[in-house]
């Protein structure tokens, strides 16, 4: 659970920062626009990590196993 909260925060911060910069440039109120986007993205990112992590872990194990052989 701690992993999902930390990873979700870092991932959503990075993605919303990059996409906000691309879409808005360094607008005068950039920080507040970016913060608004991040506040929406953060809980979604955490929920997605909870949902997708088991699948991603199994898929990663299968791929690594195939690469070893």
Image (cartoon, helix red, strand yellow):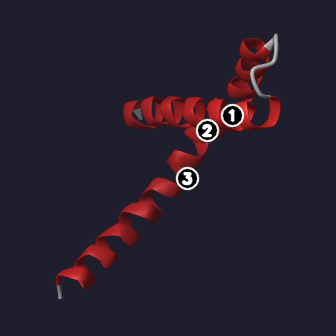
Q: Which residue is mark 1?
A: 41
Q: What distance separates the C-alpha of mark 2 from that of mark 1?
A: 9 Å
Local packing at callout 3 (Cα closer than 10 Å; few below 14, some 14-19, many 20+) is few
Q: Residue furthest front?
A: 26
C-alpha distance separating marks 1 and 3: 15 Å
- How many numbered marks, from 0 up? 3
Q: Which residue is mark 3?
A: 51
Residue 14 as seen in the image, left or right of residue 54 = right
Q: Which mark is residue 69?
A: none
Residue tagged by mark 2? 15
Q: Give yes or no for contact between labels 2 and 1 (Cβ–Cβ under 8 Å).
A: yes
Mark before the other along the chain sequence, 2 or 3: 2
Q: Residue at x 17, y 88 (%)?
A: 69
Q: Residue furthest left?
A: 68
What is the secondary structure assignment of the residue under circle 1? helix
In the picture provided, is 63 more to the left or to the right than 53?
A: left
For marks 2 and 1, give the one nearer the viewer: 2
Q: Is residue 49 visible?
A: yes
Callout 2 secondary element:
helix
Residue at point 44% right, 62% down? 56
Residue at the location (52% across, 46% down)? Answer: 49
């Amino acid at each position: 659970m701690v992993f999902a909260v930390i990873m979700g925060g870092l991932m959503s911060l990075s993605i919303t920062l990059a996409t906000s910069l691309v879409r808005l440039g360094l607008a005068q109120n950039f920080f507040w626009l970016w913060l608004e986007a991040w506040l929406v993205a953060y809980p979604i990112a955490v929920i997605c990590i909870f949902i997708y992590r088991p699948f991603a872990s199994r898929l990663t194990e299968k791929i690594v196993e195939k690469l070893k052989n």
